């Protein structure tokens, strides 16, 4: 519990600014391709690929991410972490404001 929880209005305002949001992780991995004569795969280096891992209905899922989407998804994951922290603060702030009104 924080000594001075943020007012609900500040939490609500901060939440509105956090778009896009995502929960998961982003990883750069190396995968072989489908071409038998690929020199990169034959050398063992393979091809770099970005993967987004997340949970859906309790199961771990992964999706390929284009290079163009990597910065967007990184920001979305960071915003998702901030949103989770604000949600934790919101519960305390909600109860604190309710006690003041009572």
Image (tube, grey):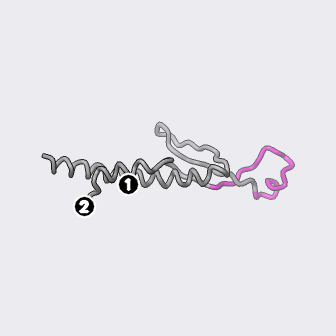
Residue 48, position as x, y percentages in the image: 71, 54
In the image, the segment drawn in magenta is 28-45
Describe the element under mark 2 as helix, strand or loop.
loop
Q: Which residue position holds label 1?
A: 85
**Residue found farthest to the right:** 37
Residue 20, position as x, y percentages in the image: 51, 47
**Residue found farthest to the left:** 102
Q: Residues within 10 Å of mark 1 (few under 14, many from 20)?
A: few
Mark 2 or 1, nearer chain start: 2
Q: Please name whichever residue, 60 or 5, is drawn nearer the observer in this view of the structure.
A: 5
Residue 98, position as x, y percentages in the image: 19, 47
Give me the residue at 81% from left, 56% from top.
40
Instruction: Give the quadrant of the N terminus.
Output: bottom left
Q: Residues within 10 Å of mark 2 (few under 14, many from 20)?
A: few
Left/right of residue 16 with respect to residue 36 in the rendered view: left
Q: Please name whichever residue, 84 or 7, is drawn nearer the observer in this view of the structure.
A: 7
Disc 2 versus disc 1: nearer the observer: 2
Residue 50, position as x, y percentages in the image: 65, 51
> Is 63 colored magenta in this rendering?
no
Q: Which residue position holds label 2?
A: 4
Q: Please name whichever residue, 90 or 44, is drawn nearer the observer in this view of the structure.
A: 90
Give me the residue at 62% from left, 52% from top.
70
**Residue found farthest to the bottom:** 3
Across the whole image, how many numbered discs are drawn on residues? 2
> Is 41 colored magenta in this rendering?
yes
Instruction: Tell me if label 2 and label 1 are in contact, CB under 8 Å.
Output: no
Give me the residue at 27% from left, 54% from top.
7
The quarter of the displayed image where residue 82 is located: bottom left
Could you tell me how far apart the alpha carbons at marks 2 and 1 are, in whole angstroms? Answer: 15 Å
């Amino acid at each position: 519990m924080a000594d001075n929880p943020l007012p609900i209005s500040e939490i609500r305002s901060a939440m509105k600014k956090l778009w896009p949001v995502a929960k998961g992780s982003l990883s750069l991995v190396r995968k072989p391709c489908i071409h038998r004569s690929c020199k990169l795969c034959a050398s063992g280096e393979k091809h770099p690929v970005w993967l987004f891992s997340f949970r859906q209905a309790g199961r771990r899922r992964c999706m390929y991410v284009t290079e163009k989407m990597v910065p967007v998804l990184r920001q979305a994951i960071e915003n998702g972490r901030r949103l989770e922290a604000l949600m934790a603060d919101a519960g305390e702030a909600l109860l604190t404001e309710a006690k003041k009104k009572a």
